[in-house]
Image (tube, grey):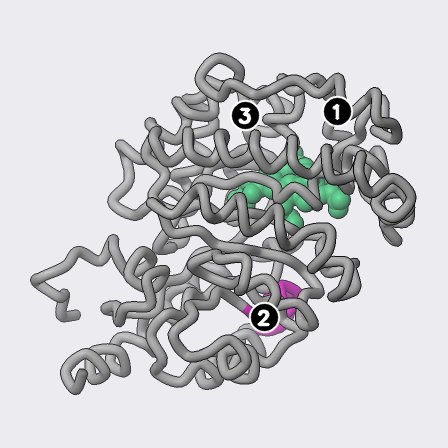
Amino acid sequence: MVKNPVRSEGDAFLRACRGEPAAHTPVWFMRQAGRSQPSYRRLRETHTLMEIVRDPRLAAGVTVSPVEDLGVDAAILFSDIMVPLEPMGVAFEIREGVGPIVADPIRTAAQVARLVELDPARDVPYVLEAVERAAASLAVPVIGFAGAPFTLACYLVEGGPSRGYIEVKRFMWSQPDVFRALMEHLTRNMQAYLAAQAAAGARALQVFDSWVGALAPDDYEAHVAPHMARLFAGLRHVPTLAFGVGTSGLIEAIARTGPAVVGLDWRVDLAVARDRLGADRPVQGNLDPAVLLAPWARVAEAARGVLARNGARPGHIFNLGHGVLPETDPAQLQRLVALVHEETRAATHEGEQTS
Ligand code: 1CP
């Protein structure tokens, strides 16, 4: 195996974020640190999710382990999108098998006005220390992250996981000024939170707008896009990645808010998405996470399909269209990483030589 002498293998992810050719197509997985990993399941027998998150040694260890186990090109900070909300005055618990439950869902102007400003160094020092520790022990970049204002608002207003997002939509349409104040509060504070992670050593920042695909394009433009544009405008010094599920009808609007990389779920054809966004816009995705439950031959076929749709265009970060399912066999993930690296090494080298 020939290694490129000029650049380390560790920078493929950042090069792709910038739209530059890389030694191979970089690959990492959302939820790569989680229930699919035996070491994580063992740790969870003795610690709750929040105990791991609040212990920088444990959180850094969980962040680092998928890089060692799977050979991925980036690590994602082990934390949760809800973590910075507690110091903002929002009490919640992460309920086993359900997700975040907010004790007192936000429905009024008075509740929005009571939200506290986050001071990352004072309020979540353990997150910043986990980033520092993980970054210090890894050759590949650590990705910092936060929930996007709308997706956080979903949990705050609904009070927990939701199917229809009816309460957050009712709130957005019936109290638009209060909703805007909530989004502004979240935007300002998530920007500070993300900037603090970058200062602690995160080399890229992913904004999880998991549930934004619930919105019609007009509502996205009116109630979400301006806040996202402000968020990304304040984070120009680090590559940013926008992620959402069910966003096939929104990707151009998402791209206009200014992230470096647009995340794609599996419901959109990657080639079509790249044409729609313009070839110079880096993208991340977009294998259906459920494919990993199929026999390996199907996984390989589907992964080759994603790579073929990208062609040899630079600026592709291979990922799943959403998080790794807990039922996934880690051996499948390991083989998938190796396949992406092997099948793209030659193609991108050729691309580099001719460019
Ligand atoms: O203890 C556990 O294993 C419970 C499952 C779990 C895990 C592993 C939760 C509860 N959070 C996490 C960690 C986590 N959450 C990470 C780091 C792990 C990694 O990616 O390797 C990240 C990036 C998140 C972000 C997160 N939390 C998102 C955005 C990504 C996505 O999946 O769309 C969301 C929506 C949450 C809320 C949340 N926290 C936990 C659950 C089960 C959920 C989803 C609940 C729902 O469906 O609404």
Classify mark 2: helix, strand or loop.
helix
Whole-Å distance between the Cαs marked 2 and 1? 35 Å
Judge by depth and name the residue closer to the eye, 207 or 67.
207
- Where residue 118 appears, x then y in whole percent? 56, 21
- Sooner in the amino-acid sequence: mark 1 or mark 3: 3
Determine which quarter of the picture holds residue 14: bottom left
Asked whether mark 1 and ligand 1 are closer than 8 Å, the reply comes as no
Callout 3 amino acid: Val
**Which residue sits furthest front?**
177
- Confirm whether the magenta stretch covers residue 226: no
Callout 1 amino acid: Glu
- Span of residues in magenta: 286-295
Judge by depth and name the residue closer to the eye, 5 or 152.
152
Callout 2 amino acid: Glu
The residue lying at 44 percent from left, 17 percent from top is: 121
Asked whether mark 3 and ligand 1 are closer than 8 Å, the reply comes as yes
**Which mark, by number, is residue 53?**
3
The quadrant the N terminus occupies is bottom left
Report the side of 18 relative to 29 (left or right): left
Report the side of 130 relative to 276 (left or right): left
Judge by depth and name the residue closer to the eye, 255 or 230.
230
Crowding at mark 1 (Cα within 10 Å: few <14, some 14-19, many 20+): some
Whole-Å distance between the Cαs marked 1 and 3? 13 Å
**Which mark, by number, is residue 93?**
1
- Where residue 227 appears, x then y in whole percent? 61, 46
**Which mark, by number, is residue 252?**
2
